[in-house]
Amino acid sequence: MKITIGRFDKGDFPELSLFDIDLKIDSGAYTSSIHCINIKEIKKDEESLIQFTLLDPEHPLYNNKEFTTKNYTSKMVKSSNGIAEKRFMIQTEIFIFNKSFPIDLTLSQRKEMKFPVLLGRKFLNKRFIIDAIKKDVSFKLKQKN
């Protein structure tokens, strides 16, 4: 059975030490993305790694924690302005509606965007129905528990 989600919500990314972060539900976007700064590919002991810092110093949840992982890929993503760019993508877990779901997140600089995390169709498909009049459905459920 599909879960009804509103147009905005809050979610947790335990592996990234982010909790109650604002999410924008975007059925127009194929991939999900998260706002990062200092995104760079590095070599360490002949191994390719991706290094990034989540959010930016102006964001209230910013913790200046640098992440490094070898579990990443890259893909071409067409942004809302129609320009295709290469982005790095990581796999992690998102906790919403009192459940954990695997999610692929592209790393992008979303500083000018109101929401640091965008949930796209690839993640939403077959799991959720969007009711655009609702918001914070998962977050309100979390508050009750």
Image: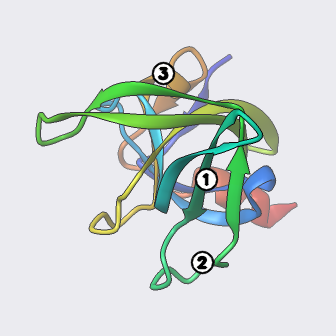
Q: Could you tell me residue 78's position as x and y percent? A: 23, 30
Q: Is residue 76 above or below residue 105?
A: above
Picture residue at 54% right of the left edge, 27% below the top: 123
Report whether 111 appears left or right of 137.
left
Q: Could you tell me residue 7's position as x and y percent? A: 41, 48
The first of marks 1 and 3 along the sequence is 1
Q: Quadrant of residue 114?
A: bottom left
Q: Which residue is mark 3?
A: 122
Q: Quadrant of residue 49?
A: top right
Alpha-carbon span between mark 1 and mark 3: 24 Å
Q: Which residue is mark 1?
A: 51
Camera-near label (2 vs 1) is 1
Q: Which mark is residue 133?
A: none
What's under tag 3, amino acid-wise?
Lys
Quick one: SS at disc 1? strand
Quick one: SS at disc 2? loop
